[in-house]
Every structure is written in C-alpha cells, then in structure tokens.
Image: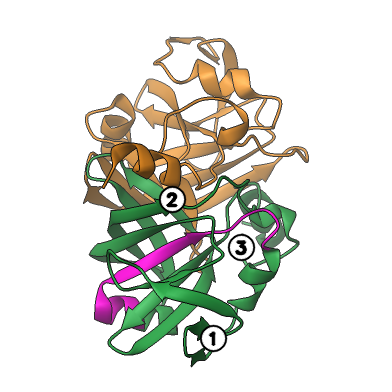
Chain colours: A green, B orange
Amino acid sequence: MDPKARQVALRKLPYGLFVIGLVDGDKVGAFTAAWISQCSFEPPLVMLAVKKGSLGHAMIEASRRFSVNVLAADQKEMAAHFFQQRPRSGNKLGAYAFTPGSGTGAPVLDEAPAFAECQVKQVVPAGDHDVVIAEVVAVTVRRDAKPLLLQDTGFDYYGG
Amino acid sequence: MDPKARQVALRKLPYGLFVIGLVDGDKVGAFTAAWISQCSFEPPLVMLAVKKGSLGHAMIEASRRFSVNVLAADQKEMAAHFFQQRPRSGNKLGAYAFTPGSGTGAPVLDEAPAFAECQVKQVVPAGDHDVVIAEVVAVTVRRDAKPLLLQDTGFDYYGG
C-alpha cells in the first residue's frame, strides 16, 4: 500500500478537535485530540485513541477519568496551545483558565462552549495508540457554537 | 445527567458519514455509519462502532472485513439510502453500483470518491454497540472531494 495514497485516503475522514483534560491527584494536564467518537447510546460511551507513552496516556491510566472540551470554530489557537504539555499556574493550565469538573475533577476549560466528563471502562491496545472506552458521566453546554474541524485548521496530525 | 443536555453536548462532536461495505461469502451488504475514527498510525488502524444485533455486526463478525466508503458533501442521498438494508441485484446494491474491493472483496461503491478496505483485528463490547478495531489494508482515492459531514445533513442518528 502506497504510504502517500494511504495518507490522502485516511485524511478524507473528517474530525473535530478537542482538548482532553487530565487529573491525577494534584496534577492536572491537557492535550489536543482528534481521534474520538461516541460509540454507544446506552450507556453513553465514547472511544478515544491515546498515544502510547504520552503523558495523557499515563494520566488516564492512573486516574481512569478525563474531560472532553469541545472547541468552537474560532478556537483554533486553544487547540494549538495544547499540542504541547503546559504547566499549571493556579487556576490556569498554560494560558487558559480551568475549573475542576463537578463530575470527575478533571479540568474543564472556562472558554470551552461545552464539555463532557468521562470515566474509563476499558483500555484496548491498538497499534501505536490505545483505544480508551469511557462512560460520559456529566455534560455541560455553556453556549451554542459551531465546532472546530481539524480539516479547517491546516494542522496535520492525522492520516498517517 | 439530564438526557437532553447529554444529547446537546454529545452532538457537539462532529462526524463524517460513510457507507460501510460488507461481504460474507456470496452475500454483500452496506450500512451508513458515523462513529468511526483512525486510532493508530503504525499499523494504520481504525475504530468503528457497530450496533449489536445489526446485520452489519453479524457480517463483520463472520467475515472479519469491511470497506469504508468516503462520501462527498453532495452525496447525502447515498448516505440516506443505506440507512436501511438494500438487496443486491447484479452489480448493484440497492440503487448504487459496486465492485468487490481488490484488498478484501468487500463491496466498494463506484461513486465513492475514496475508500479504504479493512481487516478486523479485535471486537470489543461497548454498551449497545461493539467497537471494531481494524487494519487498513488497501486504499483508493479516485478524486478529490470535500467530505460529507453529519451535522450538515439534518440526520439525527447520534448523540443519544
């Protein structure tokens, strides 16, 4: 299989972009993710691919919880910000204020238009990532917003 | 958790729409799916949520293979067509011509701008669906096309 053709084909799959919020004891963190989808109505479950060996992987394995911060179409900078690890300073993670989510304690970004909080049910090895299957235990919608789409950003973390 | 809030929040996750092509011996089939994402670069893997008890679920479990037909933004009718089971008639599945994919034999729609063929690695129970983790073994890109997005269609099979 030609690697270039593979990349072109796999990039035809559209994605959103989300900031995954992490907590483990006193530590908080966040990373930007695209490979996430709902996978069950009842109970409400999501599937999230998390890179093996990453900080996010370690924190999710340890704490078994995370938040999914939905980003609005005009919040591309927030997605880019969490491509790298950001230090906590008071109620900020990098440049953005957060609050511990009421359902899990995982950080939720104050500017995110909506977010879900999730408890991990299962972690399944899948190549260079793990597939994390998690139950949505709390949701908050703050305002209506058109979601940010990966293909509108010019970022290229996808498609192999 | 309020069911309405849950639905509104989960519908903030953007999705594409795809026709999943199925083969099992002489039988072919297809169904429209949104809950799919890449989940590994190397090897190239996708994760697909498939409803328990559905024909697609049975055929994927039996044959361990499927195709993912990417749809273009103007192919909403094709997505709607495969919300229900369609009979095969010669080289047509319902109203649309198909060809057996060279990588798996799973049907690929002649009008799809791109498609991937996948071999199942693992089936993981996840609520009312199963998560199917599959390796992309062949890809074809026929033409460039803006992908169809679920939120542009008005269809509502998502978000619980």
Tell me the magenta residue range: A59-75
Give whichever of A128, B66 is nearer the camera.
A128
Point out which mark residue A85 bears.
1
Q: In which quadrant will I find the N terminus of chain A? A: bottom right
Query: Which residue is the site of mark 2?
Result: A37
Dot 3 or dot 1: first in sequence order is 1
Q: Given contact means CB atoms under 8 Å apart, are the residues at marks 3 and 1 in contact?
A: no
User: Disc 3 and disc 1: Cα gap in Å?
Assistant: 19 Å
In this view, B61 is above or below B135: above
Q: Amino acid at mark 3?
A: Tyr
Dot 1 or dot 2: first in sequence order is 2
Q: Quadrant of residue A155?
A: bottom right
Q: Residues within 10 Å of mark 3 (few under 14, many from 20)?
A: some
Q: Amino acid at mark 2?
A: Ser
Q: Secondary structure at mark 2?
A: strand
Q: Secondary structure at mark 3?
A: loop
Q: Which residue is at 55% across, 87% downward?
A: A86
Magenta run includes residue B154: no
Where is residue A48? Give x, y as percent.
40, 61
In this view, A86 is above or below B136: below
Q: Secondary structure at mark 1?
A: loop
Q: Quadrant of residue B62?
A: top left
Q: Amino acid at mark 1?
A: Gln
